[in-house]
Image (cartoon, grey):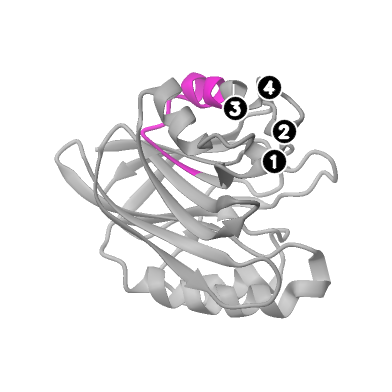
């Protein structure tokens, strides 16, 4: 079994300034042709999304199946992460994560694809550098426990808001059930030339290739990885 995976912070609030923002996000996803994609910063009927359901719009434009995981209410709607896949989402739930600042969550989904069931996690950790470092560390501890209990084979993707050498990532990897995939030297947040977005896998997967897609309308570049099930 081969699986093409994408993680993409879509900067959903930018849709309030650019009418073509979400269609261009969908175009970037279609061109990358992932089997499964995890999205962050997704707005569902908020004022900044102009009262549209961004996840549903992207799903319609890409022809992929969808589950939206709410992190919090925002501006009259909801805000969180989403999973899109050409497979069937058999089950999904959003786990609230601890920490101060904007509420965060970990989206867990069971996906049936090509005759196999995989567990796919999507998250977006607290931002603002050192200010919310303790919040991120508590979030990492929680999601590390949840992902460790997930049914293999599993993958974790998302915007972790830290560079590769950060304590947060070392703490996650110390759980022992995940490994970091691909060359982490390339930036995914071009404004500051930082790597903030990552894909992790368990021992069941063999990484075939990974790449940063240097384009799209978001302030993050999407990250794509190709896997083979051992």
Please give the name of the residue rendered at 52% of the width and 77% of the height, measured from the top-left corner. Answer: 174
Q: Earlier in the sequence, mark 3 or mark 2?
A: 2
Q: Is residue 146 left or right of residue 181?
A: left
Residue located beneath label 3 in the image: 22
Q: Which mark, by number, is residue 16?
A: 2
In the rendered image, residue 159, in percent from the top left (x then y), is placed at 62, 53
Helix, strand, or loop for circle 2? helix
Q: Position of residue 216 (x, y in %)?
A: 66, 26
What secondary structure is found at the residue carrying circle 1?
helix
For residue 13, the mark is: 1
* Camera-side residue of 230 and 47: 47
Look at the picture and state if 24 lies above or below 125.
above
- Residue located farthest toward the left when viewing the structure as drawn: 115
Query: Where in the figure is residue 101, as x and y percent of width and height?
Result: 71, 71
Q: Which residue is mark 4?
A: 19
Disc 2 to disc 4: CB gap under 8 Å: no
Q: Is residue 228 visible?
A: yes
The secondary structure type at the circle numbered 3 is: helix
Label 1 neighbourhood size at 10 Å, few (<14), some (14-19), many (20+)?
A: some
Q: CA distance from mark 2 to mark 4?
A: 7 Å
Q: Nearer the viewer, residue 78 or 114?
A: 78
The crowd level at tag 4 (other Cα within 10 Å; few <14, some 14-19, many 20+) is few
Name the residue: 24% across, 38% down.
1
Rounded to the nearest angstrom, the CA distance separating label 2 from label 1 is 6 Å
Viewer-closest of 83 and 140: 83
The tally of labels here is: 4
- Mark 4 lies on a secondary structure that is loop
Report the magenta residues as a range.
Answer: 25-38
Drawn side of residue 118 relative to residue 156, left or right: left
């Amino acid at each position: 079994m081969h699986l093409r995976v994408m993680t993409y912070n879509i900067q959903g609030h930018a849709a309030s300034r650019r009418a073509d923002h979400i269609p261009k996000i969908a175009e970037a996803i279609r061109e990358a042709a992932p089997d499964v994609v995890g999205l962050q910063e997704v707005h569902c009927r908020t004022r900044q999304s102009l009262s549209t359901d961004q996840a549903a719009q992207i799903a319609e434009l890409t022809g992929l199946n969808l589950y939206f995981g709410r992190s919090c209410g925002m501006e009259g709607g909801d805000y969180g992460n989403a999973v899109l896949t050409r497979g069937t989402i058999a089950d999904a739930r959003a786990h609230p994560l601890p920490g101060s600042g904007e509420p965060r969550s970990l989206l867990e989904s069971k996906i049936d694809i090509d005759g196999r069931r995989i567990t796919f996690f999507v998250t977006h950790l607290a931002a603002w550098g050192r200010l919310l470092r303790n919040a991120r560390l508590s979030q990492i501890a929680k999601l590390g426990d949840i992902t460790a209990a997930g049914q293999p084979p599993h993958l974790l993707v998302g915007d972790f808001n830290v560079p590769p050498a950060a304590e947060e990532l070392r703490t996650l990897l110390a759980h022992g059930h995940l490994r970091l995939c691909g060359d982490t030297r390339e930036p995914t947040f071009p404004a500051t030339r930082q790597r903030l977005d990552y894909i992790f896998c368990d021992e069941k997967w063999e990484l075939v290739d990974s790449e940063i897609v240097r384009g799209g309308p978001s302030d993050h570049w999407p990250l794509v990885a190709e896997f083979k099930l051992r």
